[in-house]
Amino acid sequence: MSPVFIYVLVFIGVSAIVGVFFFVFGDGAGKSNDRLDLLTGRRRKDDEATTILRKTAFDRDKQSLLMALTPHLPSLQKLIMQADANITPSSFMAITLILGALGMTASWLAGVKIYFAPLMGLLFAVVPFAWLLHKRASRLKTFGSQLPESLELVARALRAGHSLAAGLHVVAEEMPRPIADEFNRVYEEQNLGIPIDEALRSMCERVPNLDLRFFVTSVCIQRQTGGDLAEILDKIGYVIRERFKIMGMVKALTAEGRLSGVILIGLPFVLFLTMLHIKYDYVEKLWTHPLGVKMSVTALIMQLVGALVIRHIINIKV
C-alpha cells in the first residue's frame, strides 16, 4: 500500500474524529451562557421569526432523498427535535456514514480479518445514534424533574390574577432549560393566534411525557367545563412528586437486578474479545466449524432471550 494513501486515510480519520468530538462536546459554551443569563435575569429565547425559520428548515430537510427512501423508519427529525440537537437529519446521517466508513477503514488498516470490517463499521455508525438517544433521554428526564415546580409556578400565577398564558410566560422567564424553551414556544404560538389548547397538544407531541399529558388534558377539560385550575395544578404537581419518590424506591430495589443483567449480558462478549486477542485460532472455530456456527447462533439467541427476561423483571411501571 502506498504511504501517501495511508497518510490521506489517517488525515481523513483524524479530521472526522475531531469533527465528531466538537459536535458532541461543543455545546458547553451554550450551556454556560444559559446559566449566566439565568443568574443575571436575562433569558435568551427564540422570537417568532426564529421559530418559523427553524420549522421551515426542518420541513425543507425532510424532503431530502434519504427521508424519501426511508418513509417507514422512525422519524429522525422528531428524535433530533426531542433531543434539542442543533443539526439537520441529513447532516446527522452524513456523520453516521462517515464514521461507518472510518470504522471499516481503521479495521482494515489494523489488519483485522475482512469479514470483521462491516462489524466495526456498524459499531462506529451506532455512536451518533447512541449519543442522540442519550441526549434525548437526558433532556426528557430533566424536563420531567422540572415539571412539578413549573406547575406550581403556574398555579401561583393564576392565584395572583394572571391568565394561563401569562403563567406559561412566567415559567418561560423563571425556569431553566429545557422546560423554559417548551413553555416559551407555547406562549409564542398562542401569541401568533394558535389556540392555546392546540399549542399545548403540540408540546405533548414534542415532549412524550405522561405527566405533561395529564397537565394538558386537565387544562383542556377545565377550559370546557370550568373549575379551579390552580388547585388542579397543585394536585397534579403533588402526584408527580409522589411518583418520583416511588420511582426512586423502585430503582433502588431493582439496582441489583440491573447490575446482574449488565454483567451477564456483557461478560460473554468481553470474554470473546479477550480470547480473540490471546488465542485467535481457538476462537476461530466458532465461525469456521459448522458446530461452532450453530453454537454461536444459539448463544446469541439465548443472550437475547435472557436480556428480554431480565428487562421484563426489572421494568416496573409506576
Image (cartoon, rainbow, N blue to C red):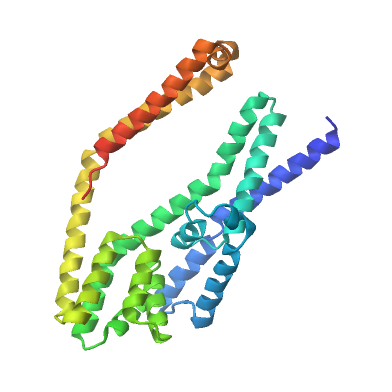
Residue 21 image offset from top left, x and y in percent:
60, 50
Is 282 situated left or right of 314 in this image? Answer: right
Residue 263 image offset from top left, x and y in percent:
37, 29
At a point 31% along the width and 60% down the height, the residue shown is 209
**Closer to the camera in the image, 186 or 11:** 186
For the N terminus, the quadrant is: top right
Residue 158 image offset from top left, x and y in percent:
22, 83
Is 280 situated left or right of 82 in this image? Answer: right
At a point 63% along the width and 41% down the height, the residue shown is 100
Residue 274 image offset from top left, x and y in percent:
52, 20
Please say if 99 is above or below 69.
above
The residue at the far bottom in this view is 161
Please say if 282 is above or below 4.
above
Viewer can see residue 263: no
At a point 79% along the width and 36% down the height, the residue shown is 6
Please say if 222 is above or below 301.
below
Is 79 situated left or right of 121 in this image? Answer: left
Viewer can see residue 220: yes
Please say if 76 is above or below 235.
above
